[in-house]
Each structure stands twice: as structure tokens, then as C-alpha cells.
Amino acid sequence: MRNGMVSALDSRWTGQEPTWEGASEWTDEKIYHTFTRALDFYGYYLDLEDYIPIILEYLKNENPKDKTSLDNIKKSPRCVEIIILGKLARMINLGMPICHSGKNYKKKINSYLKTISDNVLLLTVEKETVKKGPSIFDIMQTKLRYGVIVHLDTMLDKWIRNNTVDVNKINVTSLLQSVGAPVNALGCVTTWFETQRSELIEARDKKCSQIVEAYSHLSKPAIKRRIKLLDEMLLDVDVYRSSKKSSRKPRVKKQKSADKLVKSLKYLKSSSEYGIVSTNPMKLIGSEKAYIFNEKYRRLTVLVQSDKNGLMVKGTTILDFHDDESYSTTLRKPKEILSAISTKTERQITNIMNKLTTKKNKANGRVSSNTLIVKA
């Protein structure tokens, strides 16, 4: 730094470090523009270690008696929260308004400080004892924070910089699969989406004057586009949750040879296009009803048992289904219907299927390498 400001060696292209003098008199548009430019500026010039003294300066200005937070920053493992916290602290140190663009950035900073404090505590516990480590749930929360939430925050930063409808979502299903996220640890991801979504809805419906003002730089179509993308990503989380449940090893069936009955069954284990994972084929044995979907031809087949013994499998074909009650139909909106089958109750599924207008044909029960076992 030079004269207390970040040296901008490439100022010809990046400009000098953004300042906030007189920001209390600025328009929302100018605050928003300066904020997004500052994020890019610090990302270009500063390294992770550069943010440590910036954060310490912020803490000394805010609460010089808070020795715990100062120590935690010094002891903290170098993580992505340091970078985000450092950028916000630098802007507030220079006079950025605490509240703008629909966010209270002091609350954001406190949230990152808590995360860093938790990391320090976890690190201390690991050093003190080898036998007692963090719980599996804590480990998964950490994985989700670094493997999913950080990517969502990055996506949100891009949305902030772009005030048009031309924004895109990220592949949440792939992120969750990459960390092997269990069902009981998905709460933090769902909460992140719901928080962003509720603010945008309040801005769209003009329920809160402060939030309406904060999002005034976005047109109504731009707000609707962001809500739509958040809804789609929330649906991806629900589908992932349902897929994880369906892929669990089923309870032992009365028929001990169930695994042998399905050993020749060739089926599609998962579909990246629709975010669906096939349920264990052993569940077909003795099942009252099964839903299978041919991805290649977009044909859904519903098979209903013909007697109380349930469905049976022989080779590559499902047997013992009722000819009149079972049927096959083409889906116009496969992702929507498959998601409903995976997540909703049987009664709700029946109501949805009854509303389909496509022609129902006779079912044959054949399963191929293009066929997903959606539910059984």
C-alpha cells in the first residue's frame, strides 16, 4: 500500500482504489457501481495474506476491547472467508455505508467472523486431542461450506455486478454430488436459497420499502429471472435429497433371492439431464407399483401389481402387473413430472398423472439400458 491506499500498478485498466468519501449523499446506483468495482479491484490486487491487517484494523475500529476476535483472525486457517471478510472490511474502513443493495454488511461480517471463530475452535480441538475429533455432521457442514456455499456466494457476486436478466445458475446437483452431501446436512444449502429468494420476492411484491429501494437497480424482469433460477436450484436440491433416499440399501425382503432375480436387469443408474438416480432394482420385487422412465424416448411406464404378491422380475422384464391398470405414456415435461414422482406422495402423483393429456398405451414392462427406475 502507498499512503494508506492499495497501489494500483495497472491503474490504466483498473483505475485507482475506489473511495467512499461523501457516500452518504450518493444515489443507490452510484453506491452499487462503486461496490461492484471495489470487489473486482481487490480481487485483482490483493492476496489472501493482505486481508489480515485490513480485518484487524476493522476490528480495532469497531470494538478494540474484543481481543477474542483479534486472536481468532491471527490464528485462523487461511480460508475463503478471510478474502470475502477482508474485502467488506476494507470498504467499511474507507466509509462504505453499512446497508445497501438489500444487505446489512455488518451482519455479513459478523457471520464470517463466527465461521472463522468456529474454524479456530475446531482446529484447537484437533490439536488438543487425537482421539476426539469433530463430528461427522460438522465435517459435512465444512465440506458443504467450501464445496457448495462458496460457489453460491460467487454466483451471487456475479448477479450483483450484472443488473440485467442475463444471469445464469450453477449446477447445484454436481456440487452436492462432488462432496457426497448426506440428506441430513442439506439444511444450510436450503437456507441460503430461501434467504436470497425471500428478499427478491419482497422486492418484486414491494412489501418492504427498504428492500425495494435496495433492489431499485434491477428491473422487474431481472428480479423475476433471479427468483426463477433460485426456484430451479431449490428443486435440484429436493431432487438430490429424494435421489439419495431412494438409493439407500433397501430393507431385506422376504424373498432371499431378490438380488439374484435382478442381476440380469440392465437399467440406467442415473440421468444427468434430469438429475435422477435410479432406485435400487431390488425394490421392484414385491412392489405394489413401479414407475420406470425411458430417457431416450421420454416414455413413462406405470406398472401396478396384479395380485397381493406384488411385481416380479425375470431377466430384463418386470412381470405380474395388471394389464388394465398399468400403462405407458410420453411426457412433454419430463423433469417436472419425474421430480413430482420422486418427491410427492402416491395420492399427489396420481392426481398429477390424471391431468396428463398425452395418450396412454399398453405397458410391456421391458427395461433397457436407457430406462430409469424412478420409484418402486
Image (cartoon, rainbow, N blue to C red):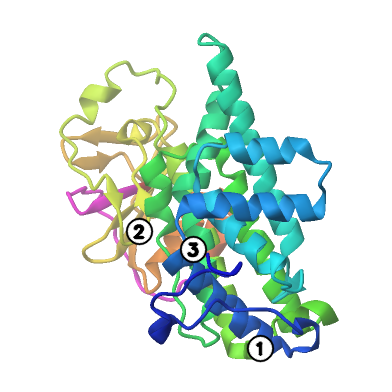
As drawn, the label of residue 30 is 1
Q: Which residue is mark 3?
A: 154
Residues at marks 3 and 2, CA–CA distance in whole angstroms: 46 Å
Q: Which residue is mark 2?
A: 327
Q: Residue at x 55, y 54 (%)?
A: 51
Q: Nearer the viewer, mark 2 or mark 1?
A: 1
Which is the main secondary structure of the residues drawn in magenta? Answer: loop
On the question of residue 365 being in view, the answer is yes
Give the magenta range.
355-373
Q: Is residue 371 left or right of residue 182?
A: left
Q: Are marks 3 and 2 in contact (CB under 8 Å)?
A: no
Question: Circle 1: is it few (<14), some (14-19), or many (20+) Cα within 10 Å?
Answer: few
Q: Nearer the viewer, mark 3 or mark 2?
A: 3
Instruction: Depth check: give the residue in front, 345 or 97.
Output: 97
Instruction: Depth check: give the residue in front, 132 or 356.
Output: 132
Report helix, strand or loop for mark 3: helix
Q: Is residue 184 left or right of residue 239?
A: right
Tell me which amino acid carries mark 2.
Tyr
Residues at marks 2 and 1, CA–CA distance in whole angstroms: 60 Å
